Image (cartoon, rainbow, N blue to C red):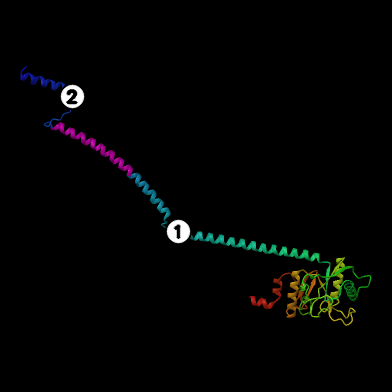
């Protein structure tokens, strides 16, 4: 085979085997084909750029939305209008003051109710104690040497002095108050003579068996318990109406010869009322009130002889009677 035949065969084989590839091959001399290829590449690049731009736009839009949400939160947290902030603060302050006033009023109401309840409790307690002593009287100033039948004889003599006949004398149980014998020192009686009219305070000393009582020493009171309460009230009424509530009954007038001293009849007061009466007697000695007396275990005072009796139930009432203390407290 000649060289020319080989070239033609090779040319044909190239033509047959690579015919499909030649269509995609750019001829450097073919300027039109080259421009079309570049145009296709630029179109593809533009399409890719457009997709990239869309993706970036979406990301930017999401970032803008997130930024707007952050700004909105910041606007809510950080008030821009100071006038609105001041208004809200003033309203909150007003609400706090209102709550404080309500709580204060509530506490004050509870305190008043507690005070009233305490007063009612003390009043009921005092009433119960006075009811238990409603049939009792005390004989103060009876010599300490009197005991047993001598005490009853002293009571009978007092009843006669008050106008009772032998058949009218009330039936009673009488005894001297026990101050306790376990100690050599006699404890002071709470029925002190200091609560009686026109008498100075006395001291409490020692009482020994077989030894006469010192006149300056107040002997223990004698407890008289009446069988009937009406009989007790009548006995005490006669004692008061006879004008002896302030001066008492002299032992000499009762038939005890030259025995000095006086016997007083007093109601069996509770501890609280004993203290109130002692304080009232101090005011009377100072000339701040006219008289002090008891009715059914309660303390009454008269500022002047023309004033109506006033019931005294607490130390506050005593303070109101003392004008000097009232002026000092103002």
Q: Which residue is mark 1?
A: 85
Mark 2 surroundings: few (<14), some (14-19) or many (≥20) residues within 10 A? few
Q: Nearer the viewer, mark 2 or mark 1?
A: 2
Residue 163 is covered by the magenta coloring: no
Rendering coords of residue 217 (x, y %): 79, 78
Whether residue 309 is visible, yes or no, is no
Q: Identify which residue is drawn at 71% across, 73% down.
A: 318
Whether residue 96 is visible, yes or no, is yes
Q: Main secondary structure of the magenta part?
A: helix
Indicate left or right for 270 with 84 as reference.
right
Q: Nearer the viewer, residue 38 or 149?
A: 149
Q: Nearer the viewer, residue 180 or 61?
A: 180
Which quadrant of the view contains residue 313?
bottom right
Q: Which residue is mark 2?
A: 20
From the image, which quarter does the N terminus lie in? top left
Rendering coords of residue 226 (x, y %): 86, 67
Q: Identify which residue is drawn at 15% across, 21% down.
A: 16
Rendering coords of residue 254 (x, y %): 89, 78
Q: Identify which residue is drawn at 35% across, 44% down.
A: 62
Q: Secondary structure at mark 1?
A: helix
Rendering coords of residue 184 (x, y %): 77, 73
Q: Which residues are magenta?
A: 31-59
Residue sitting at the far bottom: 258
Mark 1 surroundings: few (<14), some (14-19) or many (≥20) residues within 10 A? few
Callouts 2 and 1 close, C-beta under 8 Å: no
Indicate left or right for 214 with 69 as reference.
right
Indicate left or right for 19 with 7 as reference.
right
From the image, which quarter does the C terminus lie in? bottom right
Task: Give the mark nearest the N terminus, 2 or 1.
Answer: 2
Q: Nearer the viewer, residue 72 or 117?
A: 117
Alpha carbons under labels 2 and 1: distance apart: 82 Å
């Amino acid at each position: 085979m000649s060289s020319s035949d080989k070239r033609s065969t090779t040319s044909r084989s190239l033509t047959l085997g690579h015919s499909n590839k030649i269509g995609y091959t750019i001829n450097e001399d073919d300027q039109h084909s080259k421009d079309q290829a570049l145009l296709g590449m630029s179109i593809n690049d533009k399409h890719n750029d457009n997709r990239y731009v869309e993706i970036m736009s979406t990301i930017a839009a999401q970032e803008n939305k997130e930024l707007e949400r952050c700004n909105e939160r910041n606007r809510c947290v950080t008030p821009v209008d100071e006038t609105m902030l001041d208004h809200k603060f003033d309203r909150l302050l007003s609400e706090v003051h209102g709550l404080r006033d309500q709580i204060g009023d509530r506490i004050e109401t509870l305190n008043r109710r507690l005070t009233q309840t305490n007063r009612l409790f003390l009043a009921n307690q005092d009433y119960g104690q006075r009811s238990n002593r409603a049939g009792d009287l005390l004989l103060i100033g009876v010599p300490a040497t009197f005991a047993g039948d001598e005490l009853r004889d002293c009571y009978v003599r007092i009843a006669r002095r008050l106008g009772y006949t032998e058949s009218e004398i009330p039936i009673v149980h009488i005894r001297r108050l026990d101050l306790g014998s376990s100690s050599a020192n006699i404890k002071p009686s709470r029925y002190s003579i200091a609560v009686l009219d026109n008498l100075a305070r006395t001291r409490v000393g020692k009482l020994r068996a077989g030894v006469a009582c010192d006149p300056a020493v107040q002997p223990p009171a004698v407890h008289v318990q009446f069988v009937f309460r009406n009989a007790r009230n009548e006995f005490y009424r006669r004692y008061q109406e006879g004008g002896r509530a302030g001066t008492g009954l002299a032992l000499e007038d009762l038939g005890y010869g030259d025995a000095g001293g006086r016997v007083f009849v007093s109601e069996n007061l509770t501890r609280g009322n004993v203290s109130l009466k002692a304080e009232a007697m101090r005011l009377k000695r100072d000339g701040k009130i006219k008289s002090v007396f008891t009715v059914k275990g309660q303390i009454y005072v008269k500022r002047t002889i023309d004033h109506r009796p006033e019931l005294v139930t607490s130390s506050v009432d005593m303070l109101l009677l003392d004008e000097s203390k009232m002026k000092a407290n103002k």
